[in-house]
Amino acid sequence: MQITLETKPYATLEADALVTYVFEESDPLQGHLLEMDQSANGLLRKLVQSGELTGKTLESTLLHVPAGLKAGRLLLLGAGKREQFSGATLRKIVGAAIRSLKAKGVKKIAFLVGEKEANDAAAQAIAEAVTTANFETDKYKTDKKTDKQIESLAIAGYPDSMRASADAAISRGRTIGEAQNFTRDLVNEPSNKLTPRVLGEKAEAMAREAGLAVEVLDERRIADLKMGALLSVAQGGPEPPRMIVITYVPAKANPQAPVIGLVGKAVTFDTGGISIKPADGMEKMKYDMAGGATMLGVMRAIAALKPNVKVICVVPATENMPGGTAQKPGDIQTSMSGKTIEVLNTDAEGRLILADGVTFAKQLGATALIDAATLTGAIVVALANVNVGVFGSDQAFTDKLLASAKAAGEKMWQMPIDDEYREFIKGSFADIQNIGSGKGGGAITGAMFIKEFAGDTPWIHLDIAGTAWNDDAKPWLAKGPTAVALRTLVHLLMSY
């Protein structure tokens, strides 16, 4: 899809539809909207007076053949209260417009930004939103929606003096949006199409195309490195595990910046193992590799955006199957770090593979760590599908990530990891156990388990179990994978 900046007057733009937004205030008709109302002989004022046009968030009003405009349609979307307007609001508005209009067969859209909102951040947000909203999850359907794709979007409302910076912002937004779609496509793959080996092949192909250093460790190398925690999860099925390592080295590294280790859980299918899950909803367990897919998407983005910080991405990939060779509750495993783990529940497997992933990232030179994982149902109980759970051992590092989340328009909430919770995972017959002692705090004990392997290294854990998958289609996003946390992590890395 073509995304361009158009500095011509909006009324002269030839498009199938012109889209803009309306604020919820005493008089919604201001600026461009007042001009449009005058050209349309007061039609918009009549809609305001009748209560049909209020500006309430995502309220939609579509006018055909609007007077005074060359565009064939005018779509007005509610933006809510002006003082609460943000990049996140703008992304939702743009995404809702794209998904609504593409369903009507519209191909060519112009999006008009208000005078007060015409800046580089808005241009980037629009490009991201357009790219992600145009994505469909119909890869395996015979009746695809290929005839209902937006072909072009022109961003209007900017002066010509801003062209250079706005064009650069659009390019950034497209890059980040395409990385999100890459992640979503991986997460949406069924497990018979995306095994750990295939994920390794796809990661390697992406890295080589992006110009990144890559190595995919097979089961023999994993065994040689004594990654017993990862191997224990993989032993229940015929599919061998993989450990994916991708490295980005900047041309000029910021000497004050840490070496960031990104570690992503990639269980390409999770049955729960011997502690098997209920059948209801198990088909969604193909998304248990969303953390790993997100980290791969981040690497794809930064290869193009080029932050001044070295990044090492480590993705342990496996299935968790209940075969005759599967590990059993009560088994004791030795991790790569040498710590022994009492496996009380084989469905708490994500933290096992992250233990070896975090240890390996440190061994490769990471001096600060961030892991992302669909780790616990407990985080869904705590935060539903609204916020990502954030756990951090270093408050300054955690604050920096939370600031990036706010700037990127992603909802994240910091959770506690007080020392008292360490007692919950103290092992009876090994150094630690892989679930808590039945006193609650499941998301916290999962995080505390991973923290054990991070040690003194500054570390952040993102529990994305409730936010990585969208059960119901949103007006601005298709049902399925969300690529949550990718924008935040890219913003964080670019901030160095």
Image (tube, grey):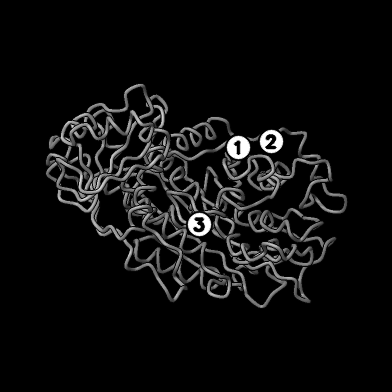
Q: Which residue is mark 3?
A: 479
The x, y position of residue 136, in whole percent, is 42, 62
Q: Amino acid at mark 3?
A: Lys
Q: Residue at x 29, y 58 (%)?
A: 150
Sequence-wise, the earlier of marks 1 and 3 is 1
Q: What residue type is disc 2 on?
A: Ile
From the top left corner, tell me how far across and down residue 257 is, in percent: 43, 38
Tell me where residue 223 appears, x and y as whole percent. Answer: 65, 69
Q: Position of residue 430 (x, y in %)?
A: 83, 53
Instruction: Report whether 324 appears left or right of 224.
Output: right
* Label pair 2/1, CB-CB below 8 angstroms: yes
Asked whether 275 or 338 is in front, the reply is 275
**Picture residue at 64% right of the left edge, 35% below the top:** 415
| Residue 115 located left or right of residue 317 | left
Residue that protrudes farthest toward the right in the picture: 428
Residue identifier under label 2: 417
Looking at the rendered image, the disc whose residue lies closer to the viewer, 1 or 3, is 3
* Residue 392 numbered tag: 1
Q: Residue 114 falls in which quadrant of the image? A: top left
Q: Find numbered disc 2 in the image and state the secondary structure of the residue it sits on.
A: loop
Which residue type does callout 1 highlight? Gly
10 Å crowding of disc 1: few (<14), some (14-19), many (20+): many
